[in-house]
Image: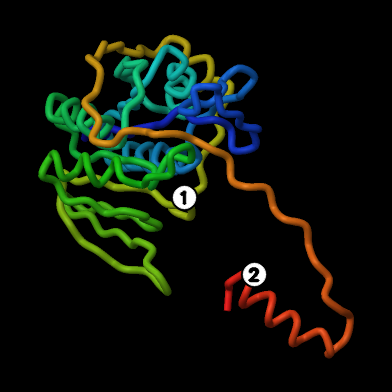
Amino acid sequence: MKIIVCVSHVPDTAAKINIRPDGKTIEKSGVNFIISPYDEFAVEESLRLKEKHNGEVIAVSLGGESHKETLRKALAMGADRAVLLKDETPRDSYAVARALADLAKELQPDIMFFGKQSVDSDNAAVGSMAAEMLGWPSISVVVKFELMDRKVIAEREIEGGHEKIETILPCVISAQKGLNEPRYPSLKGIMAAKNKPIEERALPAGQPKVDLLGMKKPPAKSPGKIVGSDVGAIPELVRLLHEEAKVI
């Protein structure tokens, strides 16, 4: 069985992010980058699938030289090899999905795993787009996964509950928190990852469908307001919630 797991190289969720003077990119100096947390669930599930059914796990990332750090993390967890689709230019979800789908057409995996979304752009679109480009079925926000022969049985989160879905391979699975507990790379795995191959493939600039016009931080929270300390303050509180906060 051949398994592709796609991983994003994103700023640490605890990092303080600043916007560069161009208003369209973030300041990367001093920012620690990690594998996107949802992608860790995807890596773990791909490794469990390999351990149960044998085969090969190929970690794939699209970006610059620094993305090798994230690929090394996937290799240290247990992936067999990695592919870096090298392109430093900004890409939207469509252009990323196009490159990943083209690679999948070449490598012909049985299944592709994604995290449900990367924690930088939060678009939650690449996995579904890649599946559409490949003509494969796709199941997103998956919290339970089982493979029997070539049949996939998965549970996905929906509002107010879970939805159970069946499909067949090849397919695309987007992992949600709760699917598994990602393993920590062992010292042996970290050392072995140094000798595992990372294949580099230079890509032409993507053809995005979306233009980024600008970035800005959310507005600072306004200070709190105390309108009273007894029941007599209720009418004023209701008025403020209606006229100022506009929540009722």
Residue displayed at 59% across by 38% down = 13
In the picture, measured across the screen, residue 54 lies left or right of residue 21, that is: left
Q: How is the image coloured?
A: rainbow
Q: Nearer the viewer, residue 20 or 171?
A: 20
Q: Position of residue 55 (x, y in %)?
A: 26, 31
Mark toward the start of the polypeptide (2 vs 1): 1
Determine which residue is flagged by label 2: 244
Q: Position of residue 1 (x, y in %)?
A: 21, 35
Q: Quadrant of residue 159 in the image?
A: bottom left
Name the kind of residue labelled 1 in the image: Asn
Q: Position of residue 208 (x, y in %)?
A: 25, 30
Q: Nearer the viewer, residue 75 or 35?
A: 35
Residue displayed at 22% across by 43% down = 129
Q: Position of residue 238 (x, y in %)?
A: 69, 82
In the picture, measured across the screen, residue 19 lies left or right of residue 221, that is: left
Q: Quadrant of residue 144 in the image?
A: bottom left
Seen as rendered, the residue at the extreme front is: 243
Residue 75 vertical position relative to residue 152 in the rendered view, above or below: above
Q: CA distance from mark 2 to mark 1?
A: 44 Å
Q: Secondary structure at mark 2?
A: loop
Give the foreground label among 2 and 1: 2
Label disc, if present, on residue 113 of the rendered structure: none
Q: Secondary structure at mark 1?
A: loop
In the picture, measured across the screen, residue 181 lies left or right of residue 159, that is: right
Label disc, if present, on residue 180 of the rendered structure: 1
In the picture, measured across the screen, residue 118 lies left or right of residue 204, that is: right
